Each structure stands twice: as C-alpha cells, then as structure tokens.
Amino acid sequence: MMGLRVVFLIENMSFPKDPRVRQEAAALRRQGAEVSVICPKGTRGVDSSSFETIDGIKVYRYSQPWQGTGATSYFLEYLWAIVCTFGLLLRVFLRDGLDVIHAANPPDVLCLTALPFLLFGRKFVFDQHDLCPELVNSRMAKSTLVRAIFLFFERISYKLAALVIVTNQSACEVASTRGADAKKLRVVRNGPDLDVFVDVHAVPELKNGLRYLALYVGTLAPQDGVERILKAASHIVYQRGRKDVTFAIVGDGDSLESLEAMALGLGLDHLVSFPGWLDGPDYLSYLATADVCLAPEPPDEFNHKSSFIKLTEYMCYGKATVSFDLLESRRTLGPAGVFVERDDTNAFGDAILDLLDDPDLRRDLGEIARKRLRTDFQWELSRKALIDAYEAILKKSRLF
C-alpha cells in the first residue's frame, strides 16, 4: 500500500473530530498510504483553518454557511458541500494526484463529487457510517419522496463503489438487499484504539461534590434522544427525590442550545453540565470518573440498525451502560448492558438508579464490558478488516 494516494471525504463533521475517519486515515497512513481529508470547518472556532497537516495527514477544510434542519436547508447544505468538495478534490488531484476517493456518509450525495475522477480510472470507496434513508426519517417528518431521493443516491453510491464498508451486521444486511454487490461488501466495526484510550485516573471534582456521575458522550442531534436524559434526570430528582447524582453531557451538535434551555426549564441546570466537545485527557477523565454511562437513542428504525461509537468507549473503561433496547446496541453490549424495553424516560431513570445503588452489579457488568471490548470490538480488529478490504480491491486494480 506504499504510495497509495487516498482522499477521505466528510460532510457532517470536521476532521479530526470524526473518530471513525480519524482511525481509518491513521490506519492507512500507517500502511504507507498518502492520506488527505476534505471536510467542513468546525464550529465554535474548532478546526477552523483552511489547511493543516495532522500526523502526516493533509486536511483541507471549507466553510459551511448552512446547517440542515429541513428540506430546503439540507438541499443548500449538501449543494454547497458538493461544490466545495469537488473543488478541493480537483485541487488535490492536480497538485498531488489521487488513487482512491473514500467517502464517509452522511450524506450519500458525496458520490457525485467522485464521478469525474472515476472516468480516469480512480476508485471510489463508500464508507456507510449511517443508513441515510432511515436517518432522514428520524430527523424529519416521514416523506415518501424524500426517502426515495435518499434511496436513489444510496444505490448510486453502491453501484459506483469498488468497496462498500459498513459498521455492523444490520447495515450489511440492508446494503445487500438494496443494491450493494456482496463481493464488494465488508464490515469494519467501530471500536476504540487501545493505544489512545489508555487508563487514566478518575477526577472526583467532575462529580461537583456529589456521590455519582452519570455520563453521556457523543453528538447532540435530534436522532440521539439526549433530551430523554434530561427527562430521566427530572424523574430522578423530583419524583425519586435523589440529590446525589450529577449528569455530564459531553459533546456538541445541532441540539446543544435547546438541551441547555431544556435543562434550565426543568430546574436541572445545577445538576447537568455541558462541557462541550472534549478530546484527549479531558475526555478520558470523564470516562474514567463516570459511575454509569448512558445511551438514550430512542427505539426507531434508524437506531435499531446503528452501532454507536460511545458504547465501545464506555466498554473500554469498564462501565455499565443504560440503553434503550436496540438491536445493534444489544449485539454490542451483550450482557454488559441494562436495557429499557420501551421508550419510557421514567423507566430509564429508574434503571440508572438501580445501577447506582448496586455497586456489585456495576462492577460485574463493567468487567464483562471490558473483556468483551478487548475480545470483539477493539480497533485493532477493525483496522485489520479495513486493511484487508483495501488490499482486496488493490489486487483487482491495474493502478496499484
């Protein structure tokens, strides 16, 4: 793979904020590939430079003036992303050359930027992080037309790709029934890199003087269901009468401001903190300190088929997790999870308290989680799957 020129495309997140692309790019760089990334600039002044080199990876960023909340704003966001991404791809192609365009969805329309380069024999890799037709239904009112549009671009992406990468078995099954060639299809799971997720000491100060810390990490978007944590916290505090639990919601996204306003409206602002998007030791300290971790994604079609990076990061630190009963979450957590069967925030809050009040159960579930992570879900296993998948397409190509 020495000298292979790979360009990653991201639209919904900046780099290196996207943990999956960060790990994939580093894995290919480690194999000798020349790696570039094209993505939007970050929000709130983070990752705001137009160009920089990070660990040998060239990062090209563009400004994104639109953020999708409805059909019109999504159209403008995606149209602008296509124009900017293609322009930067052309720049990389003319300046450094490229062999593989590796597009990480959402959205699936990034395949359009690769089309002209495929005419010159370049290869397209479709890295399907999310099932976009299901995702759009979870974020907006269901629309047969909108779903048909997203299904169309998903099929185009499958057809153009020399390699289709998915994150779990559910996505693999969906892809195989919606047009992906089984010979091109590979599962590369999300998982923490044990060289990065090292043991750190707990920081009691993060509990704000209280006995317990309940933790959520990840994006703050409508489909993530983080408002359910606030409703569960309200139940814990005002119906169960518990004043010994603090909640940390670590992350950033479209819903941050509304969640902060909701916490204030529920009278929880003194018990719920929003540290923002963290990385490095600050982030790991929260994982090490938490007494229980939370996965509030509601049971819908999209979430049932999704694998959440946060779950394996919780497992890496030996934490018991409260989750709604989702198919892929159950496949990931296994016996290390406590599952709430229905979309009931009071039941979610009760499950949190049951775990906090049973230290032996938390310890046992945490040990199961840590062992399960190292056996089945650590990044080294996924890294090998990614490299094997790339080597399979390289053998078929006259370019490499």
Image (spheres, helix red, strand yellow):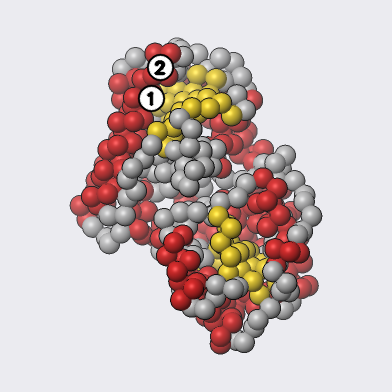
Residue that mark 2 sits on: 93
Front residue of 242/198: it is 242
Asked if 368 appears above or below 394 in the picture, the reply is below
Q: In the figure, residue 119 lies in which quadrant?
A: top left
Tell me if label 2 and label 1 are in contact, CB under 8 Å. no
Estimate how packed mark 2 is, as few (under 14), some (14 to 19) or many (20 or more) residues with alpha carbons within 10 Å: some
Nearer mark to the viewer, of 2 and 1: 1
Describe residue 259's horizontal placement relative to residue 54 as left or right.
Answer: left
Please tell me which residue is depicted at 56% across the width and 26% down the height of the picture.
53
Disc 2 residue type (three-letter): Phe
Which amino acid, mark 1?
Leu
Q: Is residue 104 in view from this perspective?
A: no
Look at mark 1 in the image and give the residue it sits on. Answer: 88
Q: Residue at x 50, y 60 (%)?
A: 327
Q: Position of residue 234 (x, y in %)?
A: 53, 79
Placement of 9 over or under 362, stated as above or below: above
